[in-house]
Image: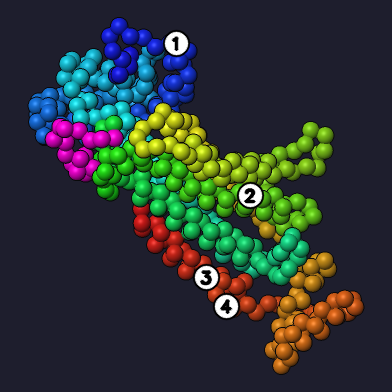
Amino acid sequence: MKLWQKENTSVSELVERFTVGRDKEFDLLLAKHDVAGSIAHVTMLGEVGLMTKEEANTAVAALQEILQEIQDSQFTIHEGVEDVHSQVEFLLTQRIGDTGKKIHSGRSRNDQVAVDIKLFLREQVLLMRDEVANLFDLLQSKSEQFKDKLIPGYTHLQIAMPSSAGMWLGAYAESLVDDTELLAAAYAIANKNPLGSGAGYGSSFPLNRTRTTKLLQFGALNYNSVYAQMTRGKTEKIVAMAMSSVAATVGRFAMDCCLYLNQNFGFLSFPSELTTGSSIMPHKKNPDVFELIRAKCNRIQALPNELAMMLTNLPSGYHRDLQLTKEILFPAIEELKSCLQLSVLMLSHMEVKDDILKEEKYRYLFSVEAVNELVNQGQSFRDAYRQVGNDIEAGAFNYDFSKGLHHTHEGSIGNLCTQEIKDLMDKVLAKF
């Protein structure tokens, strides 16, 4: 059954398989949103006189039953039914008769899909926000816990200056603040109502789009009907860009953990049950979780480009190309959430080794401290730099690094500004 099919016409089975693709699989994710959109639309139709009050009430009650079946995992798209929209209308007509055939007045599958995707992405962005916030809170907690455990800092993968495990973890917490800014922007884009734009050119029916916007709790309308359809693909790409930013942070953190667990670094440890072994090397404790997080996050970072290539050169109006955005984006959303959840699990059980910088190989980390000490004694920075550099080249560098460190400015080892970073995150979260 197809909403667009006329009598005495048929479609090639090969063409049908090709055009439907994996749509039914992803339509099940949209089902509750499709019914929510229909409830809002039918309520509005009853209010503007395109359905009687009694017809609208009957249809809404039946739609709510269908919604409950979806929430109870009792909803399927039957064989021979093209998509979720057709299935819902079929069930509705089956239950309440010809009244069910009226719910499509002033609506196209184009704006049905658009509203379904907006509602779905709005919900998913909030779920991703919550997972990011969980990881942020844990990073901050661990940052405070390990703020006095010194580790090497690196540039060019060469030892550079002293850092701390707290400073390292706090950096990723603050990175998530900026990533959440992009999630908030994606939420704002998804939180606009395209319902009532029809096939992209509005309707001669006296629809009340402001009413459906309120019923669906959208923040605003996509006013222009042409643009409402142009948000298909664009909304998905913007969400993907926000996801890519989160993935970049999480993937980079995973890479650090792979390095720091390595015996040549040896800064971190994790319980055996969170690492994997080797089939022939009994000593191995492999960071498979972090390696998969890294790989999945790299793949997620490619999403915006993949979606951009799909949208490139599309003129205004609806095109079937847009169907494919679901199979690109929807699985990636689940992958990002799982990467965030597993990062929380691993970080919850992470331990940091004591006295790392007491090893002889890290003595040159303190060369800048030696330079700064001479500057504090009155030398110019350039002269002090040259003196310490010459000592290092001559093998005469003997700075006493047991003196401790005295870094006090904002964002340094001794002043991580954890609360200030939390305040920034709270401001961003308030935008949702």
Residue topped by disc 1: 13
Residue 54: percent from left, percent from top: 9, 25
Asked if 101 appears above or below 349 in the picture, the reply is: above
Q: CA distance from mark 4 to mark 2?
A: 28 Å
What kind of residue is marked 1?
Answer: Glu
Contact? badges 4 and 3 (CB < 8 Å): no
- Residue at the right extreme? 394
Residue occupied by mark 2: 254
Q: Earlier in the sequence, mark 4 or mark 1?
A: 1
Hey, what amino acid is under mark 2?
Ala
In the picture provided, is 61 more to the left or to the right than 34?
A: left
User: Looking at the rendering, which quadrant does residue 139 occupy?
Assistant: bottom right
Judged from the image, the secondary structure of the residue bearing numbered disc 2 is helix
Q: Residue at x 41, y 49 (%)?
A: 186
Q: Which mark is residue 417?
A: 3
Q: Secondary structure at mark 3?
A: loop
The label shown at residue 103 is: none
Residue type marked 4? His
Q: CA distance from mark 4 to mark 3?
A: 9 Å
**On screen, residue 53 above or below 403:** above
- Distance between mark 4 and mark 1 Cα atoms: 69 Å
Residue in the picture at 31% in, 15% down: 5
Give the extent of the magenta segment.
200-215
Residue linked to disc 4? 409
Amino acid type of the residue that numbered disc 3 sits on in the rendered structure: Cys
Residue 382 visible in image:
yes
